[in-house]
Amino acid sequence: MSQNPFFVGGPVSPEYFVGRTSEVRTAFNQISKRAHLAIYGSPGMGKSSLLQYLSSPEIWQQRGRDPSQAFIVYLNCTGIYPFTPSEFWREILSLLRYEAEDDPALESAIDRVLEEDTVESVDLRRILRKIGKQNKFMLLLLDDYDAALRSNDDYTEVQMLTFLNEFRDLTVHRREGRYLSTVVTTFRRLNELGPKLAPSGSPWYNHYLFQPLKPFSKAEINSLFFKSDAKLFIPISDKLRKGVLAITEGHPALLQNAGFLLYNKLQDGKIPNIQAFTRDFESQTEQFFRDTWRFSTDIEQVLLMMIALSYLEGRLNKRRYALGDIGLIFSQRSRELIDLEERGVIKNTIQEDKTVYAFTSSMMEWWVIREIENSNEEELKQREKIFLNLMSRAQAGQVFNVIRQVWKHREEVKSLISWITPILGV
């Protein structure tokens, strides 16, 4: 077999980037208009891989576009620590200088700015003016833009709002904005991040087109990973494929991890089995589920707990648990549930004219159950206020009793393989 084509622990190389046809088309449409795009999704949805793909000159050429007309700058905002506006603009211009190494006049202009103690948006505006005179533009790819939307000791909320408004002013209201296109990635939608908005004036984010990154559909998974002529074909048995789908459910990073593990086994001349695969997969991908849980709000965590508990019936010693009317709770929290769906954490189906929610990945469901198992009375007390914001005290008492039953029988959920075995029918 050839070199393992799957990528673990970092962005996928543009050469092996697959899928996201609609999202890529949207991004290039925005770029061609010198407009702006905000991509959001859970950890491992492929946000960084997509930005790397957009930054590749070879990809531009394949799509019939001229990369020489653009100065493409990629910046991961977590690299600026602590984040401050001046360091942000300085880093952008430093990276731009590298891209302009064949343009002595532009290099010289950037060098003069970088010699200053403080770099501001007005400095980038002057550089953009010079770029525009060459009939070129700057494409700014900002990864993990969340870092710019969190205050710190050197960056207050007031300073943040000033920075964001100046950035918007540069892109929308200034002539130089015609020579700039930005694509940013975040964990959540921009309107859910950043400082509180002033009562008047336009929001700092309203020049962006919002684009969620969701898990691959079943059709996409089959065509991208399980079709014999696919670039990332994984030749495995139907039963193992069913297990892979149950665990990953189209999550790009999980599919990359699964493919990497399975490809290595096949290269070693071994036939993978679900037990060995699940054991290796669990240890290699735990961080994705931990981060998804950690980055969820308190209300989202409680909703995830409710979804997980609703599916426990028949799994733990075939006990039945009374949670009350959780459908009513879900109907009152549609915004949070939509956010969780857009981030690829849960999905919904219509059953008997009712909306039913489930986890996209059985492993995420298992992770939430383990979080419930490992909690205690003190943590439950800390969450009580959140539960009471969602339901009556009587129903909260029912849910707490169910959680205590899970604690009592926690030994029955011992491993991921025992959790997904009923799904596989083995």
Image (cartoon, rainbow, N blue to C red):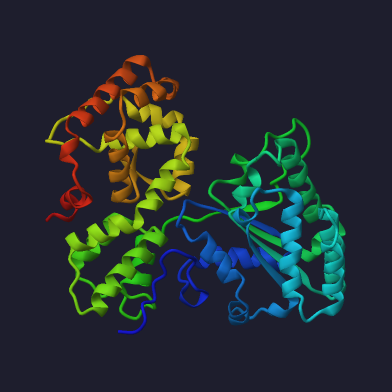
Left or right: residue 145 versus residue 304 is right
Residue 105 coordinates in the image, percent (x, y): 87, 76
Q: Please name whichever residue, 161 or 212, is drawn nearer the observer in this view of the structure.
A: 161
Quadrant showing the N terminus: bottom left
Name the residue rendered at 47%, 69% in the picture.
12
> Is residue 398 positioned above or below 305 on the image?
above
Q: Please name whichever residue, 35 or 419, is drawn nearer the observer in this view of the structure.
A: 419
Name the residue rendered at 69%, 60% in the picture.
182
Residue 78 coordinates in the image, percent (x, y): 60, 54
Quadrant showing the C terminus: bottom left
Left or right: residue 322 versus residue 253 is left
Left or right: residue 48 versus residue 88 is left
> Is residue 237 positioned above or below 193 on the image?
below
> Is residue 71 positioned above or below 88 on the image?
below
Q: Please name whichever residue, 234 or 263, is drawn nearer the observer in this view of the structure.
A: 263
Residue 423 seen: yes
Residue 97 coordinates in the image, percent (x, y): 76, 71
Residue 125 coordinates in the image, percent (x, y): 84, 59
Q: Please name whichever residue, 235 or 413, is drawn nearer the observer in this view of the structure.
A: 413
Number of marks: 0
Q: Quadrant of residue 390?
A: top left
> Is residue 392 positioned above or below 246 on the image?
above
Name the residue rendered at 62%, 45% in the picture.
190
Residue 352 seen: no
Name the residue rendered at 30%, 56% in the picture.
283
Residue reaching furthest to the top = 394
